[in-house]
Structures are given as C-alpha cells and as structure tokens.
C-alpha cells in the first residue's frame, strides 16, 4: 500500500493547462469538504500561478455550486505594503476570485497592510492571533483543507527563504520577514508548522527557472536549503508543475494516474 501522504507530481503541458487542472481539482476538493456543512479553510498563495488558478476557479460554472459561506480564505504570506498596492496578494486574490463569489467578508482573513496602523511585527502577531481563533488548545491554527504554495527559483515557499532563520521557527504561527530576497522586502509569512498542519499542500509552479529547485526538493534536499522540500501535508502533498518546470524531476516520481 503506497504511503498515502507520499508526494505526488502532476504535470501539465503549460501554465494555462496547469491552472485549469488545479482549479478543477480545487472545486472537487472544496465541494467534498463542504457538502456536509463542514468548514473548509484554504490558504492562498501569492505569485503568478496563485492568481492564475483563482481566475480559472472563478470562470468555472461549478464555482457557483459551492456554499462559499463555509469557506475561509487565508494567505500563506503577504507583502507588507499599503492595502491598495498592486503587490498585495490579497488584492490580487480578490480581483481574481474573492470579489466574484458569494463569500462573507468575515471569511476573508487578510494579513494587515503597512497602512493599517500595525507595524510589521504587530501584523504578524495579529495574523497569528486570528489563526488562533480557528485553532484549538493543541493546535493554535486551523488545518487547511488545501494550502496553495508557489515555489521560487531558489525553492522558497510562502516567504520562507533558503538558509534563513524563519524556516526553523516551530512555535509561532506567523513571522515578520525583513530584507526578503524577493521584493518587496517586508512580508509576513506562515511558518512550517502551520503549513504542514494542512490536510493537503498543493505546490503550483511553472517555468524552466523553477526546474532546479523542484528537482532538488523532490530529490530530498534539506528544507533549510530548499524550503519546498519541507512541505508535507497530512494527507497529500502534490506538486502541480508544467513540462518546463519538470525538466529536472526524476521521471519515476511523476504520477501518470493523477
Ligand atoms: O508573495 C509571494 O511572492 C509568494 O507567496 C511567493 O512565495 C510566490 O508564490 C513564489 O515566489 C512563486 O511566485 P511565481 O509563481 O510568481 O513565480
């Protein structure tokens, strides 16, 4: 019996096809989770593929069949910039999907912007407290039904970058990030314990510039050096990638049946 928590690698021809594939599976997953009235907590990701998937979800007719009042939206990370800055992951997600579905405002848990009145550390602390509202004594954050993650060319996920201290945090749920190698420099990120409490982690990455990081992550690199290597959902961890990003992934890791 295969290890059900094993990583799976699913390949699509190109970014557009990948976004369609992931959007379809996301709606199947959310429908399965909410059809009996259960809540679904979802962590969204920034980056080009994060928004591309959400746009595809919004375009699908079956998106209208979901009871979005049962779905809570969070972010794996956010840029600490003004709320109306085009760089904000939340703004991109609202334009791509959240403003196009019937989801209650209270179900959208944004990370504070730089013009919110909260400093960067306070923004991280406030997000951790909000996560705690939906956690338990034992786990001070929800277990995401699906945690979306992009992957950087250096193997970063969320705003957890290689060879930096944030990747080793195991107590706090969210951290302030300064001098981010990827602009903008100030961010708030979830930590590994929160990400890996997810039932499903879906990493979505395209392009040749990601091939090396993905090859290393899937070949068992150390997560401190390649953060994507440390993503491990409780039920599933799926790397949804396109052909260009798969060029350094060992063929025997690719799941033909998925
Ligand atoms: O806020 C961010 O920048 C993201 O959360 C970051 O982790 C992103 O997902 C990756 O850098 C991949 O971005 P692309 O898909 O645009 O390459």
Image (tube, helix red, strand yellow):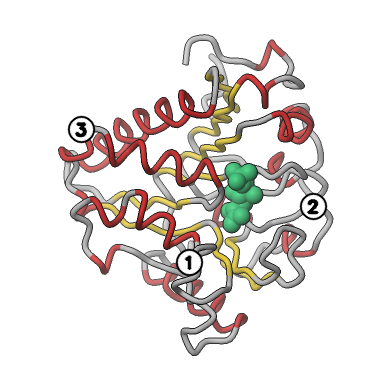
Q: At x 36% / y 49%, what residue is drawn? A: 96
In the rendered image, the vertical position of residue 59 relative to residue 51, given as above or below: above
- As drawn, 123 above or below 163: below
Please tell me whether mark 1 or mark 2 is closer to you in this view.
Answer: 2
Q: Which residue is mark 1?
A: 140
Q: Separation of disc 2 and disc 3 at Cα? A: 38 Å
Q: Residues within 10 Å of mark 2 (few under 14, many from 20)?
A: many
Q: Which mark is residue 62?
A: 3
x and y percentages locating residue 70 in the rendered image: 22, 53
Q: Label 1 crowding class (10 Å Cα cut-off): few <14, some 14-19, many 20+?
A: some
N-terminal of the two: label 2 or label 3?
Answer: 3
Q: Who comes first in sequence, dot 1 or dot 2?
A: 1
Q: Position of residue 139 (x, y in %)?
A: 48, 62
Residue 223 to residue 20: above or below: below
Whole-number angstrom distance, CA of label 1 to CA of label 3 = 33 Å
Secondary structure of the residue carrying numbered label 2: loop
Depth order, front residue of 209/237: 209
| Residue 254 image point, x, y percent | 62, 15
Q: Residue at x 58, y 61 (%)?
A: 190
């Amino acid at each position: 019996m295969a290890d059900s928590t094993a990583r799976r690698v699913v390949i699509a021809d190109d970014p557009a096809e990948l976004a369609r594939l992931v959007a379809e599976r996301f709606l199947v997953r959310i429908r399965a989770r909410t059809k009996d009235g259960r809540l679904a907590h979802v962590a969204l990701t920034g980056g080009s593929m994060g928004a591309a998937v959400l746009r595809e979800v919004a375009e699908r007719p079956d998106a209208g069949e979901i009871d979005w009042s049962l779905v809570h939206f969070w972010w794996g990370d956010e840029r600490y910039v003004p709320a109306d800055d085009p760089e904000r992951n939340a703004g991109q997600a609202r334009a791509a999907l959240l403003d196009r579905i019937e989801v209650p405002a209270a179900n959208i848990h944004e990370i504070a912007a730089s013009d919110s009145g909260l400093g960067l550390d306070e923004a991280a602390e406030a997000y951790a407290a909000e996560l705690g509202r939906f956690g338990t004594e034992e786990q001070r954050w929800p277990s995401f039904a699906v945690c979306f993650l992009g992957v950087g060319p250096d193997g970063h996920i969320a705003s957890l970058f290689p060879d930096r201290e944030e990747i080793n945090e195991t107590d706090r749920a969210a951290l302030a990030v300064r001098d981010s190698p990827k602009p903008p420099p100030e961010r708030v990120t979830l930590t590994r314990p929160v990400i890996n409490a997810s039932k499903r982690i879906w990493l979505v990455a395209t392009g040749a510039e990601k091939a090396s990081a993905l090859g290393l992550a899937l070949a068992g690199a150390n997560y401190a050096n390649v953060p994507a290597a440390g993503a491990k959902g409780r039920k599933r961890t799926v790397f949804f990638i396109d052909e260009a990003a798969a060029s350094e992934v060992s063929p025997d890791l690719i799941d033909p049946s998925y």
